[in-house]
Amino acid sequence: MLPKLGLGTWLRRPAVRGVFWATAVLTAAIAGVCARERILRLADRWDSPQPIMDRSAGTLFIAGGGRLSEKLKREFIHLAGNENARIVVIPGCSVEPSGLQEYANDWKLLGITDVSVLHADSRSIAESPQFSESLETATGVWLSGGTQSWFSAWYRGTKVEERLRGVLQRGGVIGGTSAGASAMSDVMMAGGRGEPVVGKGLALLPKVIVDQHFLKRNRVARMMKLLDQYPDHIGVGIDEGTALIVELSRGRLAVSGDSYVMAYVPKTTIGEPRLEVLKPGDQTTLTDLRNPEAAIMPGWIADSILSGE
């Protein structure tokens, strides 16, 4: 029999909490096996990308790493303007000049002709107005994988960060995968295995901590430990091959891809801490995540979500 304690107190016991989250993750994984075939059937109906969110105030396209399907990439391209997209790619690691073109080629192979690559290895370069001029007209920016601390070390607080915000203010989209996803947070999951390493990211998504490769690399424990330090934040764990799309003006969220997004919601004045498992096609808002009585719109009404209704 369980002890007669409130859920919040009960979950603070390390052993019990570990079992609770492990069970939740296992349940989601089993559901994923059963749902995968149905998701793929739905995906076959989406021959051309449809608008996922209103672009009027900017969108974040946060991918969990691993192999990203062409469908996901084309959803990002759609938000950036389809054939009129002007994409800037920012690598998340040191790259030799001879290797920079490969970052552009990944998008050119999908039909985008206007692609440029920004790569700074010092803050003085990132501060130069000439260095980031391409961001002034960009409709989409892609933060590549690597090391999330690379983005904060060279770009946080610089002209590059200022112009990234300008892209969103013009209604553009900023996407990123793996390290590029974590770098969108203010309180940034910078690494760590048993214990989380905390850093400062680009603060594009306030009060939300993003982690990636989440189920694939079993990163539940480190997320919970970091949230213990920042109980006013929501933790978002995005699995590989999956993206969380955030419409910033309304805090509206939608999930696309092959796996799950795990949202860890802190205790509020009207509810205890809880876990929300978001499937591909599910839709909610940051406000509703904090409300235990709000419903998550289910993935099987994905057609209406993707059409922007």
Image (cartoon, helix red, strand yellow):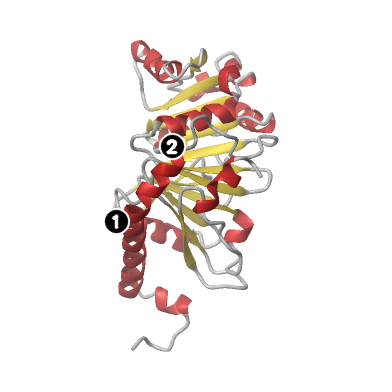
Location of residue 152 in the rendering, given as x and y in whole percent from the top left corner: 48, 35
Helix, strand or loop at disc 2? helix
Q: Which residue is mark 2?
A: 44
Mark 1 vs 2, N-terminal side: 2
Q: Nearer the viewer, residue 14 or 56?
A: 56
Q: Which mark is residue 90?
A: none
Is residue 257 toward the left or the right of residue 51 in the image?
Answer: left
Quadrant in the picture for the C terminus: top right
Q: CA distance from mark 1 to mark 2?
A: 40 Å
Between tags 1 and 2, which lies in front? 2
Q: Is residue 68 visible?
A: yes
Give, as a three-letter code, the residue at label 2: Asp
Helix, strand or loop at disc 1? loop
Location of residue 200 in the rendering, given as x and y in whole percent from the top left corner: 49, 43
Is residue 54 toward the left or the right of residue 255 in the image?
Answer: right
Disc 2 packing (10 Å; few <14; some 14–19; many ≥20): few
Location of residue 66 in the rendering, given as x and y in whole percent from the top left corner: 33, 37
Q: Are marks 1 and 2 in contact (CB under 8 Å)?
A: no
Disc 1 packing (10 Å; few <14; some 14–19; many ≥20): few
Q: Which residue is mark 1?
A: 194
Give, as a three-letter code, the residue at label 1: Gly
**Residue at left 51%, top 19%?**
125
